């Protein structure tokens, strides 16, 4: 088939954001939405990096402090702090990040993560690195940000008894 200049298969959309001093991106297909930072209800015995839970349109969602989870220094929360809701292997999770934006990249700009990855971020969470001019953006694998056990625990939080609001879930 002749290339007629269509870039559909070569382009990809990411939700890019900051966590501490690092820049990250996730495939926009994994993102359910971006919401303002809201009050989070703490859960007893939740892992340290789980801030708690929120009620998003009748659905209980665990909220993760991504800086704590990735082991990077966090910055102060401010007006640009948001919760990016992603689906990590059938579990919806909110990630606390700064300054999210949707960007288009060329798939050719993605390089495999270096063997040592980032000194500040555990390498199992990294899908690759995107070169954006003089910036480097770490492509995060949201399916690996939580272990199977953590995903099960968070899934149990989502379905915790007494948390059902009885509301119809919005589409």
Image (tube, rainbow, N blue to C red):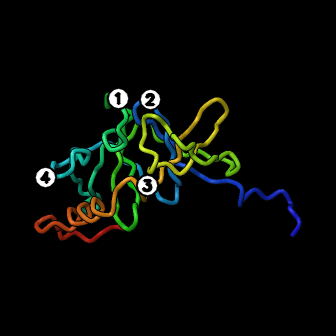
Residue 45 is labelled as 4
Label 1 and label 4: CA atoms lie apart by 25 Å
Residue at x-position 47% and y-position 33%: 22
Secondary structure found at label 2: loop
Image quadrant occupied by the C terminus: bottom left
Instruction: Give x and y (percent) for residue 103.
Output: 59, 45
Q: Is residue 128 above or below residue 79?
A: below
The residue singled out by tag 2 in the image is 21
Label 3 and label 1: CA atoms lie apart by 21 Å
Foreground of the two, 124 or 75: 124
Q: Is residue 107 above or below residue 18?
A: below
Secondary structure found at label 3: loop
Q: Earlier in the sequence, mark 3 or mark 1?
A: 1
- Nearer to us: label 1 or label 4: 4
Contact between labelled residues 3 and 2, with CB atoms less than 8 Å apart: no
Instruction: Give x and y (percent) for residue 144.
Output: 41, 56
Label 2 and label 4: CA atoms lie apart by 29 Å
């Amino acid at each position: 088939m002749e290339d007629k200049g269509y870039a559909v298969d070569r382009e990809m959309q990411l939700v890019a954001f900051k966590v501490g001093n690092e820049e990250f991106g996730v495939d926009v297909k994994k993102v359910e939405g971006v919401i303002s930072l809201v009050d989070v209800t703490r859960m007893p015995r939740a892992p340290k990096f789980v801030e708690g839970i929120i009620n998003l349109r009748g659905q209980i969602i665990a909220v993760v402090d991504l800086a704590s989870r990735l082991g990077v220094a966090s910055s102060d929360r401010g007006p640009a702090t948001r919760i990016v809701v992603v689906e990590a292997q059938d579990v919806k999770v909110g990630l606390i990040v700064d300054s999210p934006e949707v960007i288009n990249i060329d798939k050719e700009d993605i390089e495999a993560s270096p063997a040592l990855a980032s000194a500040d971020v555990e390498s199992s969470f990294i899908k690759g690195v995107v070169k954006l001019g003089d910036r480097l953006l770490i492509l995060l694998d949201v399916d690996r940000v939580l272990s199977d056990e953590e995903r099960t625990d968070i899934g149990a939080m989502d379905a915790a008894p007494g948390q059902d609001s009885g509301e119809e879930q919005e589409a």
